Image: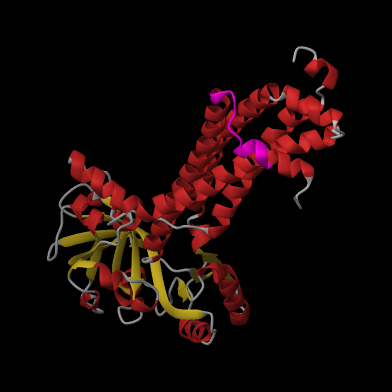
Amino acid sequence: MFKPIPVAIGLRYLRAKRRNGFISFISLASVVGIALGVMILITTLSVMSGFQREIRDRLLQATAHATVMGAGEAMQDWPHATKIAMDDPRVSGAAPFIQVQAMLTGNADPQGALVTGILPGEEPKVSVIGDKMKAGTLDSLKPGEFHILLGQELAAWLRVGVGDSVMVTTSELQSTAFTVSPRIKRFTVTGIFAVGHNDVDRNLALVHMGDLQRVLRMGEGVTGVRLKLHDMYQSWDVARDLALRLQGPYRISDWTSENANLYHSLKMEKTVMGILLSFIILMGAFSLVNSQVMLVTDKQADIAILRTLGLTPRGVMQVFMVQGVLIGVMGTVLGVIGGILLTINLEHILAAIEAVFNVTLLPSDVYYITGLPYELDAGEVVLIAAVALTMSFLATLYPAWRAARTQPAEALRYE
């Protein structure tokens, strides 16, 4: 009795048993359509976010959050740079490195790779490669012994294992009295690692920093200093601040710029998928339009009576908007609950499907993961719910406007 008249009538129409059962069916289909669209959209975006996080985390296991490098020449004061970096409370680890593109030759065709010189004692501060060793250990890299660690995929392409020799040909040139030739050095494989990211396992080789300095004749210089941060999203600011404190010509980069194409493509893929799946919600909204138009036609006499009793056209419009919005709210709420439950239990559902049909949907040798990663983002869930509610509201405008235009005399002429 305390409700506004349009709201009270709209709620009564929603609860009342309709004379035309088909209208009730269409209304139910609208609720189901909106709920399915919301549920599928939440689940899909959560799984895509989980895979993006998995790719990012695996890539950052072998690469730094940020790097500070010499501009066009080797960094000679890297011990000082490392000390300054560790004094920053945002930095959890810092280590020097040398990187050079090289051609590796084993027992098969030569393969290009990024050869990185590290200090085995300092490397665990910025990466977890030491924990990803399939054979050998990180400590096997000893200065002067010219040992090398290969990614699992790279070792497979070169057809080498622990104890085999690999010829490393760098792009740096050395001059003799009669010719100019690239620098070539034989290294012995003492370990194989597998990070789980194809770009790393296929293109990375590790050697001791001192050995690479000797091959490249860099003296005590290094390519730069790698940083690991407590908050990876501050990487650019931390690298810039370090370069400014060093007061020299330095280049800085972070994980977002070094892998910009990968992350932009993943973000674009997620955005496009979200837009496409939103059309499922739109289909539910179109069903809502159909059900409301049919309801307005079915309630012509009721509308005419309400108009003769003094209800304004605006009030009539509000009656049907209330009903349509409530259908949208029910579908959205059911979809959000269903989407969260489906996302949380999706791994168990996939396991059941694999057991019943004897198939492997996510082979570990392809995806390098165990289980199905997902990441439920509260912001995304709220955004999806808001989109569904907005579509539902817009879907009620035309039927409600059509009801408001009903003329009582014409509606009651044949009653």
Locate residue 287, reporting x and y percent.
58, 29
In the picture, measured across the screen, residue 71 lies left or right of residue 205, that is right
User: Does the magenta run of residues contain 19?
Assistant: yes
Please tell me whether residue 7 is drawn above or below residue 307 in the rendered image: below
Q: In which quarter of the image is the C terminus?
A: top right
Along the line of sight, which residue is nearer the eye, 332 or 184?
A: 332
Along the line of sight, which residue is nearer the eye, 351 or 412?
A: 412
Locate residue 304, reporting x and y percent.
80, 25
Per the rendered image, the range of residues in magenta is: 11-21
User: Does the magenta run of residues contain 182?
Assistant: no
Instruction: Kindly give the residue lying farthest to the left in the view shown.
Output: 163
Quarter of the image holding residue 191? bottom left
What count of labels does the image hold? 0
Locate residue 80, reporting x and y percent.
50, 86
Residue at 17 percent of width and 41 percent of height: 358
Q: Which colour scheme is used?
A: secondary structure
Instruction: Kindly give the residue lying farthest to the top in the view shown.
Output: 414
Along the line of sight, which residue is nearer the eye, 340 or 223?
A: 340
Residue 236 in sight: yes
Locate residue 121, reporting x and y percent.
31, 82
In the picture, measured across the screen, residue 236 lies left or right of residue 304, that is left
Residue at 48 percent of width and 56 percent of height: 259
Along the line of sight, which residue is nearer the eye, 322 or 245?
A: 322
Residue 51 in sight: no
Please tell me whether residue 30 is drawn above or below residue 381 in the rendered image: above
Residue at 61 percent of width and 27 percent of height: 291
